[in-house]
Amino acid sequence: MTNALDKGRAVTRRLNPELESVLDDRYGALVPDFAESLIEWAYGRHYARPGLDLKTRQLCTIAALTALGGQTGPQLKVNIEHTLAAGAGRGEIVEAIWQMAVYGGLPAAINGLNAAKAVFEAQDTSR
């Protein structure tokens, strides 16, 4: 294991402890080591960097995925869950998404708000 993989696993334990196994189950047969590579690179080399706290990094991720548009819906929902786990409130998430109306356009922001609404409703239903 590399240092970055260890760091990535530490980050994902906080955000979504099952992420690596879910990714491996879903993509491992197609791309061996996909899950480990993603955990090492994205979480270990980017999310674990100093300079921004995890909540801020997650809010940035939500903003970027929102601005990219509707094709990122599944990743946006996962990252909304991660952002909540990192300590952001629902209002902060909504504001990050809404801010992207200026940069990604209203359709992108509406898609983002729909993703947030779905995540929030699923959480409320499971309680």
Image (spheres, rainbow, N blue to C red):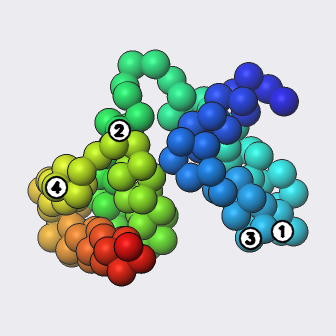
Image quadrant in which the C terminus is located: bottom left
Is label 3 or label 4 in front?
4
Which numbered disc, 4 or 1, marks the residue closer to the eye? 4
Q: Residue at x 53, y 42 (%)?
A: 14
The image quadrant that residue 117 belongs to is bottom left
Residue 103 appears in the picture as rendered: no
- Point out which mark residue 55 bears: 2
The picture places residue 5, in percent across and down from the top left corner, at: 73, 33
**Residue 18, quarter of picture:** bottom right
- According to the picture, the residue beneath numbered tag 1 turns out to be 30
Q: Earlier in the sequence, mark 3 or mark 4?
A: 3
Q: Marks 4/1: CA distance? A: 38 Å
Label 3, on which residue?
A: 26
Along the polypeptide, which appears first: circle 4 or circle 2?
A: 2
Query: Disc 2 or 1, which lies upstream in sequence?
Result: 1
Query: Marks 3 and 1, how far apart in space?
Result: 8 Å
